[in-house]
Amino acid sequence: MSTIPLLKLPILVITNILESMGLIDRFLLAHVSQRMKRIIKNSARVRNHRFLVFFNQRAGFRFETMDRKTLPEDFIVEDDDAADMNYIEKLLRKPFKLSMSKTNRQILTIYWDDVFIGMKTICEEITELFSVPVNGVCFDLNGVDYHLESITNFINSLNPRPESVRVDGEKCDFQQYKYVLENIKSSNNLACHAEPKEHLEMGDISLKFEKLYIKSGKWIKLDHLKSIEANEIVIDHSNFTDQILKNLFRNLKGLLHSKTKKLEIYVYRHVDIDTVMDDFDADEDDESRWSFPMDNGENFIVDFNDDPILRRFSILLDKKEDNQED
Amino acid sequence: MSVENAPVVDVDEAAIPVEKKMYYRFESNDKKEFRVSELAIQQSETLNRLVEAMGYTSEDVENKPAIAIENIDGKTLKLVFQWCEHHKGEAIPVDDGSVPKIVEIPEFDAKLMDIDNGLLFKLIWAADYLNIVQLLNVSCKKVANMAQGKTPAQLRRVYLLPSDEEDEAAKRAAQEAQDPRAREVEEEFEERKRQGGNSFF
């Protein structure tokens, strides 16, 4: 095996070498000795990366560069039932495996008796070693099963708050869907792509995010809008009828939270704009654009847009303060 | 070594037909002499500043002794100047902040660095000392690539890294070497404790 005495090089050269390595290589090197861990922690930076946590069919972490010029690297945590116990060497006292994906991405798989505890431990190791916060979390409601409460607590415990949380889950259980919406508190943006197999009564729900995307918006009623405290709200697959839209515009100030600057609603049917906007104190800027001046100087712009390819109709409400338009 | 016998590294005379090229002469610590073009020297911030400060004319270069580079041997310096001549005129890379660094090793560099690790180690030291940014980047990348796909135990062997126990033993040895009296005091203290003494004093 070809060798080179790394620690006999000047510290700035060592830093250059460490910063030229992939993050999995650096992570493994940090587990050679306490001294290497200190050097990696104190000397080498991690920049221009997004650190993502995922709980899907597999659970793990992904580092991807902002510019996507280099391939992402994955740390996977798997149940130790899947481990080949012939591995002699251990990492964090657990068996592990290094492999390459078909696209030449390096993957480190660590086997843990409890995947969730493994995820927490590795997350703490990574954030401590690389001084990086978790930027985003994504999970699939169909893949996390009984860990849902632990995952929600894990997300809520992250400090600083992750920029975004994405929830997937095709034909997921409505109660789990509801649990997530009710309990994820600490994220700037929530993108809920999950689609419950049935829509039951949601009841009162309080949601606080900077941006909120709800793909399966059938459950959202006008009353729910008041309790959504978000700068931007996107409701896809809404069940709002023309009459409900009319009621929304009629009582915009009463129905939207004061923080909401933008509300986008997608319905998959034709919207009769004339019916919706009939008998309104609104200025028609053009065929599809209306403005609602409010008493407090705010101005709501409403854009109707028919998308014949996706067969959907979008209604965009954009709040402009002091009558300022972009 | 005489000027005539000095190795001249990769010079393409036909490339600059009109102007007479300016060369400088350097001598390694084992007295090997090299003639290197002014443009190639610009790859090294250290040497570039040095020759600028000296303000040599062509006559000075021929008449005065070669500039001594006292801590780099001839074998290493030859690689350094081969690299500088090949990359002369290229812009010095600026750190764009990406980490991991995005460094491609060109074919020429890969061949140049197809050497034993002892020499590679010296080449990295030389690139750092002479402040040749891109040579340092590619040579560091080569060392970084040695880590790929290795387990911690393999990494320990590749990079000759001491274990925690070895580090601890080395630390103790260094402390003892620095202050032998400290060890004696410690032993005396341990002895008194064994004898049941409550206080050292």
Image (cartoon, rainbow, N blue to C red):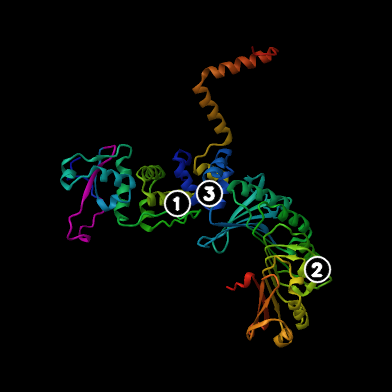
Question: Magenta span covers which residues?
Answer: B9-30
User: What is the x, y in percent for residue B47?
Assistant: 30, 45
Name the foreground residue: A312 vs B39. Answer: A312
- Circles 3 and 1: CB distance less than 8 Å? no
Residue A174: which disc? 2
Q: Are the residues flagged by discs 2 and 3 in contact, CB closer than 8 Å?
A: no
Label 3 crowd (10 A; few <14 / some 14-19 / many >=20): many
Mark 2 on the same chain as mark 3: yes
Q: Residue B116 — which label?
A: none
Type of the residue with mark 2 = Phe
In this rendered view, identify the residue nearer to me: B145 or B20: B20
Q: With respect to residue B4, does A285 lie above or below?
A: below
Q: Relative to A246, say whether A130 is above or below.
A: above
In the drawing, what numbered circle is on residue B141? Answer: 1
For marks 3 and 1, give the CA distance. 16 Å
Quadrant of residue A194 within the rendered picture: bottom right
Q: Secondary structure at mark 3?
A: loop
- In the image, A297 versus A244, the foreground residue is A297
Residue B59: x %, y % from top left: 15, 45
Which chain is home to disc 3?
A
Q: Position of residue B125 (x, y in %)?
A: 39, 42
Residue A156 picture location, percent across and down? 72, 55
Residue A178 lies left or right of residue B158; in this view the side is right
Q: Which residue corresponds to mark 3?
A: A45
> Does A255 lie within the magenta span?
no
Can you tell which of label 3 and label 1 is closer to the viewer? 3
